Image: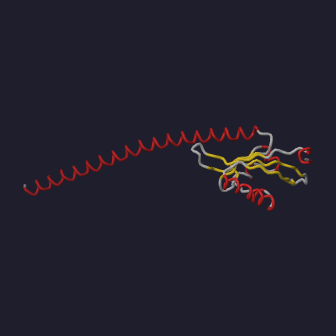
């Protein structure tokens, strides 16, 4: 009888520990699921905000008649407009994520990189003039305008640029 009582006491003790462990597990799963749902909702909100910002940026770039671009701090293209694609005669897939060295001839790429570095070092808008010869042999004269691009909290995120084509009478002056 005493052995049976000890066994029953141990059984109740093990049952109590098991119930406590299962209860703790249920609480952890409940808290994790609630946190996961909140994280999912936050991720969806952030994704929607990013998509809206991207759409606005692309709409702005698309509305510009001159070649325009946005690069990150490492010099990779983030966005370009139709005039830029037409100038370089390549689709978005061949431009986005690429550096000027992967897009332009070596001499032009080196010049562009130096100008971008100066903008990021001085954190001011800079203007320059230059020519580009396209693959079809035509030469175009441009005024390049580069400016530091800022995030909403003021952090430098890259460079925005536009290159209006200079008419002949401006080049002659």
Q: Is residue 110 above or below residue 44?
A: below
Q: Residue at x 58, y 39 (%)?
A: 49
Tell whether 93 sits left or right of 165. Answer: left
Question: Residue 46 location, x and y as percent?
Answer: 55, 41
Tell whether 32 sits left or right of 143. Answer: left
All told, the count of numbered labels is 0
Question: Residue 110 location, x and y as percent?
Answer: 77, 60
State the residue lying farthest toward the bottom: 106
Of residues 163 and 47, the one nearer the viewer is 163
Q: Residue at x 29, y 46 (%)?
A: 23
Question: Residue 148 location, x and y as percent?
Answer: 67, 48
State the residue lying farthest toward the front: 173
Question: Based on the displayed image, in which of its 4 quarters is residue 117 positioned?
Answer: bottom right
Question: Residue 132 location, x and y as percent?
Answer: 85, 53
Of residues 149 and 25, the one nearer the viewer is 149
Q: Residue at x 70, y 53 (%)?
A: 119
Q: How is the image coloured?
A: secondary structure
Image quarter in which the N terminus is found: bottom left
Q: Residue at x 18, y 50 (%)?
A: 12
Tell whether 166 sits left or right of 112. Answer: right
């Amino acid at each position: 009888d005493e052995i049976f009582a000890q066994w029953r006491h141990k059984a109740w003790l093990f049952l109590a520990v098991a119930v406590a462990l299962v209860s703790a597990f249920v609480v952890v799963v409940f808290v994790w699921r609630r946190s996961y749902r909140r994280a999912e909702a936050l991720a969806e909100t952030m994704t929607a905000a990013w998509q809206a910002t991207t759409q606005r940026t692309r709409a702005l770039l698309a509305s510009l008649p001159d070649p325009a671009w946005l690069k990150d701090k490492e010099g990779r293209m983030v966005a370009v407009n139709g005039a830029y694609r037409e100038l370089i005669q390549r689709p978005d897939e061949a431009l986005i994520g690429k550096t000027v060295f992967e897009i332009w001839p070596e001499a032009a790429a080196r010049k562009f990189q130096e100008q971008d570095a100066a903008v990021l070092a001085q954190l001011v808008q800079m203007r320059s003039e230059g020519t580009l010869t396209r693959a079809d042999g035509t030469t175009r004269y441009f005024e390049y305008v580069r400016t530091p691009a800022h995030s909403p909290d003021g952090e430098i995120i890259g460079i925005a640029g536009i290159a209006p084509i200079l008419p002949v009478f401006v080049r002659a002056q």
